Amino acid sequence: MTLLVSVFAALTCTAIWYKNAPKNEMKVGVLCWLFWGSSLMWFIDACFEYAELGAEYFTPAPVDMLNDFFLGMSVVALGMLIWLAILLVSDPKGALKSVLFQKK
């Protein structure tokens, strides 16, 4: 389930990046790299878990599926937080700078 959540996030992010490809002011490419990296990580994890469990890998308990879904959503949230921090530090539109140095 974690693999599916991260792959769907990566696909969605990649579609958004591709739609706005010539201009990169919101740094969506960084978010794509984060989600594709996590998808690769979960794919490797799934391969090793399949090697360990065999066919039982495809019949998880509902509680395990729910836990994996929450873990996948946590990974997506962490990726969004990292992207937001990068976006705020780089401040591509100068919005944060104008708010912080606004004369009163």
Image: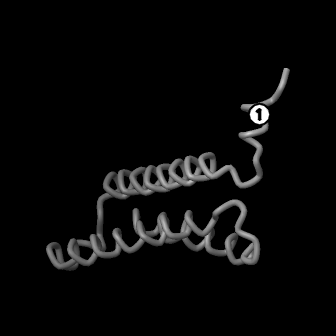
- Toward the top, the furthest residue is 104
User: In the rendered view of the protein, which quadrant contains the N terminus?
Assistant: bottom left
The residue positioned 77% from the left and 43% from the top of the image is 95
Percent x, y for residue 56?
22, 72
Q: Viewed as shown, does residue 42 lie left or right of 104?
A: left
The residue positioned 43% from the left and 56% from the top of the image is 69
The residue positioned 80% from the left and 29% from the top of the image is 102
Percent x, y for residue 101?
75, 31
Vertical relation: 58 (above or below) 69: below
User: In the rendered view of the protein, which quadrant contains the C terminus?
Assistant: top right
Vertical relation: 46 (above or below) 93: below
Percent x, y for residue 57?
25, 72
Which picture quadrant has residue 64?
bottom left
Depth check: give the residue in front, 8 or 88.
88
Render colour scheme: one colour
Amino acid type of the residue that numbered disc 1 sits on in the rendered structure = Val
Residue beneath disc 1: 99
Percent x, y for residue 94?
76, 47
